[in-house]
Image: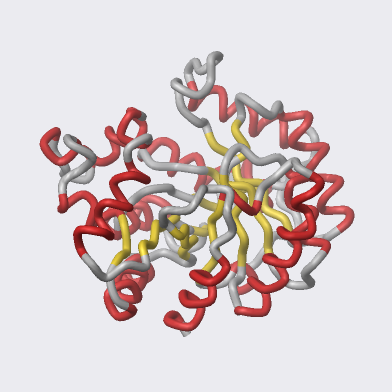
């Protein structure tokens, strides 16, 4: 991290604690009190299965981490992401302080700029994120207790200089290799990877295309795909086979494990696994998490 990041450094969370594998799920984040028990049980099982980190999908607030932290003793819990447009810096700082006081050293504040389609006030997003980080500095949130959703070079360099590292979403091993070059060896690099536990190519790609459809409407992602060498043709009709096969791990156990390993070989410290199936995003795919834990050893 840069000198500015060091100046607000806290206790930090080690890469060993974060682990090589985690799970990313919208279902782990809920404001519904009736779901706290279900989420707590799932978190306890994730820890028992050996996952290092649970990533709360959607625009999560720090307090959404509490049911998971209260039911576990080692699991790291992180937001992925807290949108800077939906949660102001003062609220995020207060939430971080409350969560860290209750469960020291086990929460990461994952921040992101979201998308113009999702945030009415979306203007100069990178400048807004920089200002947000300065507010967090002033509120005492350590740089090494936050991570940034980063795709392009400027965002990746900001994650290097002002946070523990980067949590890219919907990327490829090639993006991971390029990100590692920009970040250097020390910062955390923890990409998300969609996993379709389906061996039939047509069925697997259909599930992946259904998941990808919304993201193909967001320029942040499509521009990144083009930087990676994909063309307009690849982005049509739900995504080409080439695009789908690069973005999603699907197939039998060996094929899925090989895709995950490709990210680690490219320089990732950790891979956040998102199960993609035909269930509602809010469902908790616990059987799939068990199968992944088994095939990844």
Return the x and y of residue 141 as percentages of the image width and height: 75, 43
Left/right of residue 169 with respect to residue 13 in the rendered view: left
Q: Residue at x 53, y 21 (%)?
A: 119
Specify the farthest residue to the left: 233
Left/right of residue 172 with respect to residue 98 in the rendered view: left
Return the x and y of residue 272 as percentages of the image width and height: 49, 61
Q: Is residue 290 above or below residue 184?
A: below
Comparing 159 with 289, the one in front is 289
Residue 2 visible in the snapshot: no
Q: How is the image coloured?
A: secondary structure
Left/right of residue 97 with respect to residue 181 in the rendered view: right
Q: Is residue 201 above or below residue 238?
A: below
Return the x and y of residue 275 as percentages of the image width and height: 45, 60
Q: Is residue 209 above or below residue 267?
A: above
Return the x and y of residue 88 as percentages of the image width and height: 70, 26
Q: Residue at x 51, y 57 (%)?
A: 187
């Amino acid at each position: 991290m840069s000198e500015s990041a060091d100046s607000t450094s806290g206790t930090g969370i080690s890469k060993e604690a974060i682990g090589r594998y985690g799970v990313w799920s919208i279902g782990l984040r809920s404001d519904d009190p009736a779901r706290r028990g279900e989420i707590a049980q799932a978190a306890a099982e994730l820890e028992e299965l050996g996952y290092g980190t649970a990533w709360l999908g959607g625009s999560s607030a720090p307090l959404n981490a509490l049911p998971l932290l209260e039911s576990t003793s080692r699991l790291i819990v992180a937001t992925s992401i807290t949108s800077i447009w939906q949660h102001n810096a003062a609220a995020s700082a207060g939430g971080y302080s409350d969560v860290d006081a209750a469960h020291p050293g086990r929460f990461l504040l994952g921040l992101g700029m979201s998308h113009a389609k999702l945030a009415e006030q979306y203007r100069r997003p990178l400048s807004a994120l920089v200002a947000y980080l300065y507010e967090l500095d002033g509120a005492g949130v350590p740089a090494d207790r936050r991570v940034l959703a980063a795709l392009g070079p400027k965002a990746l360099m900001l994650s290097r200089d002002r946070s523990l590292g980067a949590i890219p979403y919907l990327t490829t091993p090639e993006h991971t290799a390029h990100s590692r070059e920009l970040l250097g060896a020390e910062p955390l690099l923890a990409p998300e990877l969609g996993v379709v536990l389906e061996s039939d190519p047509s069925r697997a790609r259909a599930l992946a295309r259904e998941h990808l459809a919304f993201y193909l409407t967001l320029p942040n992602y499509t521009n990144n795909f083009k930087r990676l060498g994909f063309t307009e043709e690849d982005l049509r009709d739900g995504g080409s086979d080439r695009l789908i096969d690069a973005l999603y791990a699907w197939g039998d156990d060996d094929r899925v494990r090989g895709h995950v390993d490709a990210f680690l070989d490219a320089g990732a410290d950790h891979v956040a696994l998102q199960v993609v199936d035909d269930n509602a995003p809010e469902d908790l795919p616990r059987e799939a998490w068990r199968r992944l834990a088994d095939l990844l050893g």
